[in-house]
Amino acid sequence: MKQILYKFIFFKLMGWKIDGAISPDIKKCVMIVVPHTSWHDFYLGLFTRGILKVDMNFVAKKELFRFPFGAYFRWMGGEPLNRQKTENKVDAIAKVFETREVFRLAIAPEGTRKKVTEWKTGFYYIAMKANVPIIPVAFDWGNKTVKFFDPFMPTGNKEEDFKALEQHFKGIIGKVPEYSYTPKG
């Protein structure tokens, strides 16, 4: 029933499309969602997740998972990050991949909703450490389309891999166009 409601709102009322999907065979991955220019991206992700019926996850500091919101955040795919002083975020998140049978981490490589000229690198090192593919996902507000691209296995050559990944986002416009990420080259 929820999926029917999501489809009605997303496709009919909002006029959006979904181009591609995540194969259910891919149980673990890092999804990079670009551009991230507005809080509106959150509900686009929720609708997309509900329509495709594919679990998608996020991580947040463990303090957010306390009462009264903890159960809701877990239900929405959240995983509390118990970051110890001796462990960096990449290592902590890579450990989550080890403990879960299915974990598709959605992350915005821009790290903010404002204009940036370079992506943060954490998503890349998480994928490397967890030995999982990166799936580029575009929230194209200009064409009202959520686009899923083919999985990409990082090679360890960060500069070349970033060039390849960034090419998926040429011409993609965010909700706030002036904050949209502009790929190099």
Image (tube, rainbow, N blue to C red):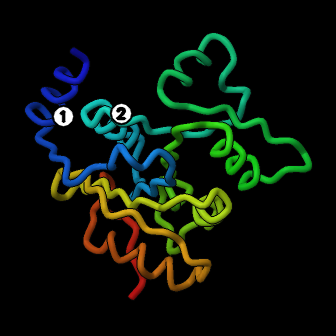
Spot the residue most to the bottom: 185
Apparent side of residue 3 relative to residue 129 in the rendered image (left or right): left
- In the rendered image, residue 116, in percent from the top left (x then y), is placed at 50, 68
Residue 84 sits above or below residue 20 on the image: above
Residue ID for mark 2: 46
What is the number of the mark on residue 77?
Answer: none
Spot the residue most to the front: 25
Apparent side of residue 151 relative to residue 91 in the rendered image (left or right): left
What amino acid type should be assigned to the residue bearing mark 2? Leu
Q: Residue at x 19, y 48 (%)?
A: 18
Residue sitting nearer the eye, 17 or 115: 17
Q: Residue at x 36, y 33 (%)?
A: 46
Residue sitting nearer the eye, 39 or 44: 44
What is the number of the mark on residue 10?
Answer: 1
Disc 2 is placed on an element classified as helix
- In the rendered image, residue 68, in percent from the top left (x then y), is placed at 62, 11
Q: Residue at x 42, y 41 (%)?
A: 39
What amino acid type should be assigned to the residue bearing mark 1? Phe
For the residues marked 1 and 2, what is the alpha-carbon distance in whole angstroms? 10 Å
Q: Residue at x 32, y 58 (%)?
A: 138
